[in-house]
């Protein structure tokens, strides 16, 4: 978790506990407002605190600033500790359940004595919730489903959060001069969507010093093991971190072994066996003689394989491809020339169009598409035809102003209505450069209904991209029920591309579905769907996922130069 996320969590917990205690109606609101402003900060809250600038943040008054300062400096907050004793409820745990908010928590605590996920689940399963004022059978079953979603996603951490924690720990350990090599391995190196624990590997002249520093790293809440070659800690966020010391001459073998996946390793070992070799975390051996181990390339080469990028190491065909020298030439960040899905404060984005354009230009993009929500998404203040026409005029003017070197593309993220119709008239759609269509309502449609609905939308001749095709939010919301095979077929027929939404919680399509899509010849658009300038950086997570889906730059439309892109999306 980033420091900003930690601070937001502390404020949220205080707000919730205050609300449940019920002494002051307005104080909790101030804390929730604080949460919103901390989570939308584009800067590290710790550096703001260091220059005494906390109270300059909108929504952060003197008392919240004190709380934040105390947490950052000591890891403790006095009022929170008092609240936790008076109100012994695991509010954050309960609040994380979809469909459960402060009102429900207060109600089930007061009426049923519910204090955590387990006791809520028990009460729900016994049917006790549906008798409470304002809660019916429907809410009760929603809560049961919500608990299942939380349980399924709870033990794993989003890649984006794991990577930022890993970077912090890495920076701290690198300050020790004796560290010669330090690498993250495991699922983090493979860039899985979610991470069970972090696995660091280190070579150092005096490993004990590294171990001692490691178990004292900032944010450690418990030391699980503290040995000469392996230590493990648990962080306040709940994430476990392992650190292993490797001998100099087997770093490659250790890196290979601890990168995994287990399935990939098992197959490699059996290949080694068939060649009369033995592979383990110390090296590749023939009898007692070490054939290789210093670097990974050597190990793969000795086994008759191309070096396999970590993102592919899941035993889904990569070893066979490497044997034939046929690994894909995977896309990299450098290949990306633009972003085709982004929002501004005209709908639910946080920044103005000019702020977004400046940030996109700073990334060196050749083109950038502004695609706000449309009218049926009222909570996002979606645009109707009139506002879209104004937006089109505005972008024409921005393009001819010459203020941006990149081409600004006119777009929209158009809502797919219940029957598959779009909520914007064709004669306006026809004036846009890039039309993305998305499902934002009626998640619970039956599979046949949803498939038909989406396919119908893709048949519209002005549609270019299907946005976040499965609608999942990792650890929060299951994907829609939809027959992707049929969707892909329809998309192919009508020259529609699939989005790979790069938001760390979406990463939608997933790796397997990306492979299936490109297999039938579909092109992919890797889009950030940025709702604020800082989210433009999420492109990297899209690239990680794209690589896990075996994508080359040719598969991805926003690697094309503008001319080729426009030619390709022309229908
Ligand atoms: P995670 O932490 O659940 O996201 O997934 P990983 O892949 O990071 O798994 P982890 O942390 O349990 O182990 C790190 C790597 O160590 C794993 O990817 C492969 C290697 N490894 C662990 N246990 C075994 C094993 O029993 N056999 C083999 N061949 N490799 C193993
Ligand atoms: Ca791991
Ligand atoms: Ca591990
Ligand atoms: Zn969007």
Image (spheres, rainbow, N blue to C red):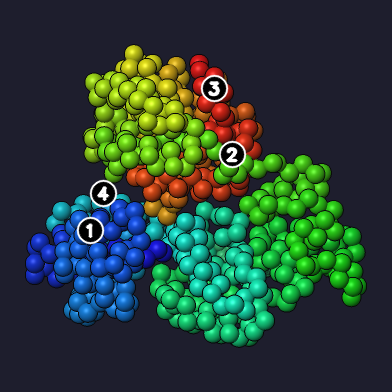
Q: Give the residue displayed 43% in from the left and 18% down from the top.
A: 462
Residue at disc 4, secondary structure: helix
What residue is disc 1 on? 57
Q: CA distance from mark 4 to mark 1?
A: 40 Å
What residue is disc 4 on? 138
Q: CA distance from mark 3 to mark 2?
A: 16 Å
522 with respect to 9 (left or right): right
Residue 30 showing in the rendered view: yes
Residue 338 at x, y = what percent? 49, 35
Closest to the observer: 162 or 479? Answer: 162
Q: Give the residue displayed 25% in from the left and 59% down from the top.
A: 35
What residue is disc 3 on? 563
Q: CA distance from mark 2 to mark 1?
A: 37 Å
What residue is disc 2 on? 335
Label 2 vs 4, first from the N-terminus: 4
Q: Decide: few, some or many residues near mark 2? Use Cα within 10 Å; few <14, some 14-19, many ≥20.
A: some
Label 1 vs 3, first from the N-terminus: 1
Residue 567 at x, y = what percent? 54, 19
Tell whether label 2 touches label 3 (CB within 8 Å).
Answer: no
């Amino acid at each position: 978790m980033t420091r900003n996320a930690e601070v937001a969590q502390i404020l949220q917990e205080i707000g919730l506990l205050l609300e449940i205690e019920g002494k002051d109606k307005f104080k909790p609101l101030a804390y929730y407002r604080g949460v919103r402003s901390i989570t939308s900060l584009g800067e590290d809250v710790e550096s703001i605190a260091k220059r005494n600038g906390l109270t300059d943040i909108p929504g952060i008054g003197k008392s919240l600033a004190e709380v934040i300062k105390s947490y950052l400096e000591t890891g403790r907050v006095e009022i929170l500790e008092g609240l936790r004793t008076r109100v012994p409820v695991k509010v954050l745990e309960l609040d994380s359940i979809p469909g459960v908010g402060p009102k429900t928590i207060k109600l089930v605590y007061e009426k049923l004595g519910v204090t955590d996920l387990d006791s809520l689940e028990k009460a729900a399963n016994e049917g006790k919730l549906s008798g409470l004022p304002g809660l019916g059978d429907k809410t009760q079953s929603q809560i049961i489903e919500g608990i299942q979603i939380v349980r399924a996603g709870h033990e794993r951490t989003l890649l984006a959060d794991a990577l930022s924690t890993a970077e912090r720990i890495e920076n701290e350990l690198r300050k020790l001069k004796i560290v010669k090599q330090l690498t993250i391995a495991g699922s983090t190196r493979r860039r899985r969507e979610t991470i069970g624990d972090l696995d660091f590997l280190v070579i150092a002249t005096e490993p004990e010093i590294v171990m001692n520093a490691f178990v004292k790293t900032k944010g450690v809440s418990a030391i699980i093991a503290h040995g000469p070659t392996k230590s493990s800690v648990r962080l306040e966020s709940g994430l476990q971190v392992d650190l292993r010391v490797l001998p100099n001459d087997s770093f490659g073998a250790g890196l290979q072994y601890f990168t995994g996946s287990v399935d990939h390793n098992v197959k490699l070992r059996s290949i080694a066996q068939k060649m009369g070799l033995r592979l383990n975390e110390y090296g590749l051996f023939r009898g007692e003689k070490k054939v290789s181990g210093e670097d990974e390339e050597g190990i793969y080469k000795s086994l008759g394989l191309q070096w396999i990028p970590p993102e592919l190491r899941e035993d889904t065909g990569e070893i066979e491809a490497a044997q034939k020298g046929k690994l894909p030439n995977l896309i990299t960040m450098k290949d990306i020339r633009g972003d085709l899905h982004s929002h501004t404060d005209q709908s639910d984005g946080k920044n103005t169009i000019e702020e977004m354009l400046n940030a996109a230009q700073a990334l060196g993009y050749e083109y950038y598409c502004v695609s706000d929500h449309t009218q049926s998404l009222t909570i996002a203040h979606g645009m109707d035809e009139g506002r879209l026409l104004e937006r089109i005029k505005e972008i024409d003017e921005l393009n001819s102003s010459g203020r941006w070197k990149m081409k600004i593309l006119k777009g929209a993220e158009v809502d797919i209505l219940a029957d598959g119709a779009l909520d914007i008239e064709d004669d306006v759609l026809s004036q846009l450069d890039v039309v993305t269509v998305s499902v934002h309502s009626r998640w619970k449609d039956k599979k046949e209904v949803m498939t038909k609905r989406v396919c119908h939308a893709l048949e519209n001749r002005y549609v270019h991209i299907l946005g976040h095709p499965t609608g999942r939010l990792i650890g929060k919301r299951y994907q829609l029920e939809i027959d992707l095979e049929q969707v892909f077929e329809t998309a192919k027929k009508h020259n529609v591309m699939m989005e790979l939404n790069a938001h760390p919680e979406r990463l939608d399509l997933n790796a397997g579905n990306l492979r299936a899509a490109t297999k039938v010849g579909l092109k992919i658009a890797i889009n950030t769907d940025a709702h604020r300038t800082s989210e433009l950086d999420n492109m990297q997570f899209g690239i990680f996922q794209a690589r896990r889906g075996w994508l080359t730059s040719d598969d991805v439309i926003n690697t094309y130069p503008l001319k080729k892109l426009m030619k390709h999306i022309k229908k």
